[in-house]
Image: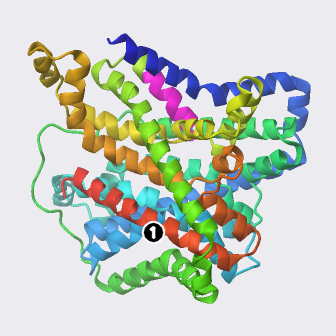
Amino acid sequence: MPWTVLVLSILIGALSLVPLGFVVAMTIATGWDTAIALIVRPRVLELLGNTIWLVVITVPLCLVIGVGGAWLVERTRLRAHRTWAVLLAAPLAIPAFVNAYAWVSVVPSMAGLGWGVFIATLSYYPLVYIPAAATLARLDPALEQSAASLGLGPWKVFFRVVLPQLRIAVTGGALLVGLHLLSEYGAFAMMRFSTFTTAIMEQYRSTFNGAAGNMLASVLVALCLVMLVFEARARGNARYAKLGSGAQAAPTRARLGAWELPAQLGLLGLAIIALGVPLAVIGRWLLDGGAQIWETADLASALGQSLWLGLLGALATTAAAFPLSWLAVRYPGWLSKSLELANYVTSSMPGIVLALAFVTVALHAIPDIYQSTLLLVIAYVLLFLPRALVSLRAGLAQAPKELEEAARALGRRPAAAFFRVTLRLAAPAAAGGAALVFLAVLNELTATLLLAPTGTSTLATQFWNLSSGIDYTGAAPYALLMILLSAPMTYLLFQQSKKAAGQ
C-alpha cells in the first residue's frame, strides 16, 4: 500500500470528522444542564415537530410520485413515454429556493407546513424517480413474466415482484430527499416556515455562534444520523443480483386502457406546477425588468465567481476523492470502509452545521483562513465528496490493475504508470464526478453565505439577497442562469442512469 495514498486518505478522513467533533465539543463545553435546558424548550419542540412532519409527509409523497412516474414510463404503453421520462426528471434542474421564489411571487401569502411540503415535493421527487426508473429499466423482465405465468395479476406482480426489486433505489432516494429536507434553508425561509436550519441561521445572525444555535445544530445532526441508520436498516441485506445476464427481451408493457387519459392529465398537471409555473414566473419577471436587468455589473461578477468557485470546488473534491477511491478499490478493508463512512456522515450534515464548525475552528485555530476562499473550498470538498467518490470509484474499478503492473514491469515508475495508464482509463468517471460537484457548488447557498470572503457573491447568494429583499425582477436573471447551468447536468445524470441500465 503506497504510504502517500494512505496518509492523504487518513488526513481527509480526519478533516471530515471536524464538523461532528465540533458538535460534540460544543455540547460538552455548554454543559449538560445548560444543553438540556436549551434543547428541552417549547421552541425546539416546535422546530422538531415542524421538521418531523415535513419529512414524514414529503418523503412518502416523493416516493409515490417517483415510483409511480417510473412505472408509467418504463412499464406501461403510455403515449409519449420517452418525452415524459425526461420531463419527470427536469424539475431537478430548478433549485428549491428558486421554486419557492416563483411560487411566492404568485401566491404571496403562502407559508407554513402545507406549502413547505408542496414546494419540497415538487423539487425533490426526481431524487426518487431517477434511480427508480433506472432500476426498472435494467430489471430482468423474466421475473415479471414468471410471476404472471403463475397466475398473478398486474397489481400483484408489481407489489410482490417489482416493488421489492426497487428497495435499494427507493430507500436511497428517500434518504436523499430526507437529507435535503433537513438541510434546505432558502425555500423554507422564503415561505416563513421554521425548521432547524432556518432557526440556526437566525441564531447565528443574532448571536453569532451562540449556545442556543449550537444546541439546535446538535439536534439536527442527531436527526441526520437517525435517518442514516433508518435507511441502512430499511435497505436490508437482501441479494438483488443474479448470475447470468438475464433475459434480453424487452419488458412487457401494460395497457392503460381507460387509465390513459387520467395518467396523461396527471403527468401534465405535475409538469405544469413543477416546471411550467417556475419558468413562466421567471419569464414574466424578465419581461417586466427589460434589458437593463441584464446590464448590471453584479450579474457578470456573480456568474464569474460562481464559475470560478465551481471549478475550484470540482478540482479539489475530485483530487481528494482519488486516494479514498484508490484505497476502496485496490485495498478494500475496514480502514477504507471507515474512511468512506466518515465522509458520507459528514456530507449528510446540513451545510449550515458544517459552516458553523469551520467558522469556529478557523477563528480559534487558524484565524488567517477565516472568510477565505481556501476555507470555503474545503467546505465544498466535505459537502460534495461522495458525488466525486462514487463516480471515481466506479472508474477505477474498471481500470484493471494488471495494466498498471505491466507498465511498471516495462520500467515505468509507479507514479508514471498511474498517470499514463490508470488515470487515463478513469478520466471519464472523474470528469463525470467533477461535473456533478461543479453544479452542486453553483447552487449551494447556506455554507456560501456563512463562509464566503467579504465581497464574494455567487449566483445563489446574489439571487437570495435580491429575492429576500422582494426585488423579484432583479433576482430573475440569477434564477434563469442557475437553471440554464443545471439543466444540461440534470439531463446527463438521467442519461447516465439509462446507460447504467443498459439502455
Residue 167 visible to an observer of this rendering: no
Total marks in image: 1
Which coloring applies here? rainbow
Q: Is residue 206 visible?
A: yes
Q: Is residue 342 magenta?
A: yes
Dividing the image into 4 quarters, which one contains the C terminus?
A: bottom left
Q: Position of residue 274 (x, y in %)?
A: 51, 74
Q: Where does residue 168 sit, x and y in percent of width and height?
A: 38, 45
Residue 264 location, quadrant = bottom left
- The quarter of the picture where the N terminus appears is top left
Q: Which residue is mark 1?
A: 484
Q: Residue at x 53, y 48 (%)?
A: 309
**145 horizontally vs 336: left or right:** left
Type of amino acid under label 1: Leu
Residue at the image point whose x is 15% and y is 37% from the top: 243
Q: Main secondary structure of the magenta part?
A: helix
* Crowd around label 1: few <14 · some 14–19 · many ≥20 (10 Å): few
Q: Quarter-wise, where is residue 224 in the image?
A: top right
The image shows residue 144, relative to residue 260, as above or below, that is: above
Q: Is residue 373 left or right of residue 168?
A: right
Q: Is residue 364 left or right of residue 495?
A: right
Residue at 17%, 58% in the rendered image: 145
Asked if residue 457 is positioned above or below residue 108 in the image, the reply reads: above
Where residue 427 sits, quadrant-wise, is top left
Give x and y (percent) for residue 79.
27, 81
- Percent across and percent down for residue 481 are 51, 69
Q: Nearer the viewer, residue 499 or 490?
A: 490
Q: Is residue 347 above or below residue 446?
A: above
Dot 1: what SS? Answer: helix
- In this picture, which residue range is highlighted in magenta? 337-348
**Would residue 457 be counted in the magenta stretch?**
no
